[in-house]
Amino acid sequence: MIKENYFKILKFPHMSEKSSIMKEKNNIIVIKILKTATKKEIFISLTKIFNVKIKNINTLIIKGKYKKNKNNHYYESNWKKAYITLEKKYNIDFNININ
């Protein structure tokens, strides 16, 4: 796999209340990923980019929601999310300090 593809597979971290609790308690991070990505591709890209050891990867597809606007009615597109369990001594920090 080409190095550029590692970054295309991982879109951005999914920040929510549930994901922050999971990170603190169980060392599980949640990332939005490319819809066509497989578990092997996710595993390879995370280990190459962040140099971490991964215990387990669970993926799921989130169904797009129906949205209403003033004049428009539309569906959001489906997207894929991965729950990645890291080994205890490894950590990925997505916080960015803007100063």
Image (cartoon, rainbow, N blue to C red):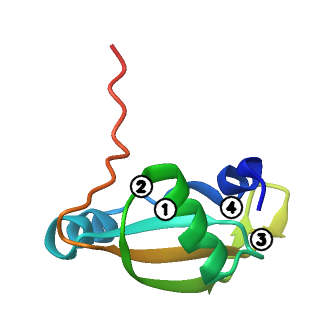
x and y, in percent, of residue 24 in the image: 17, 65
Q: Earlier in the sequence, mark 3 or mark 1?
A: 1
Q: Do residues under tags 2 and 1 come within 8 Å of each other at their CB atoms?
A: yes
At label 2, counting other C-alpha atoms closer than 10 Å, the crowd grade (few under 14, some 14-19, many 20 or more) is: few
SS of the residue under disc 2: loop
Viewer-nearest residue: 79 or 28: 28
* Quadrant occupied by the N terminus: bottom right
In the image, residue 93 sits, relative to residue 61, either above or below, namely above
Please give the residue where the numbered disc 3 appears in the rendered image.
77
Real-space Cα distance between discs 4 and 1? Answer: 13 Å
Q: Do residues under tags 4 and 1 come within 8 Å of each other at their CB atoms?
A: no
Q: Earlier in the sequence, mark 4 or mark 1?
A: 4
Q: Amino acid at mark 2?
A: Asn
* Residue visible at 74% across and 73% down in the picture: 35
Please give the residue where the numbered disc 2 appears in the rendered image.
51
SS of the residue under disc 3: loop
Q: Amino acid at mark 3?
A: Ser
Tell me which corner region of the image, top left, top right, bottom left or bottom right, holds residue 32.
Answer: bottom right
- Which tag is nearer the camera, tag 4 or tag 2? 2
- Looking at this view, name the residue that lies furthest to the left: 25
Please give the residue where the numbered disc 4 appears in the rendered image.
9
In the image, residue 52 sits, relative to residue 4, either above or below, namely below
Please give the residue where the numbered disc 1 appears in the rendered image.
47
Real-space Cα distance between discs 3 and 4? Answer: 17 Å
Q: Earlier in the sequence, mark 3 or mark 2?
A: 2
x and y, in percent, of residue 14 in the image: 47, 60
In the image, residue 64 sits, relative to residue 6, either above or below, namely below
SS of the residue under disc 1: helix
x and y, in percent, of residue 48 in the image: 54, 56
* Residue visible at 82% across and 67% down in the picture: 73
Tell me which corner region of the image, top left, top right, bottom left or bottom right, holds residue 5.
Answer: bottom right
Q: Do residues under tags 4 and 2 come within 8 Å of each other at their CB atoms?
A: no
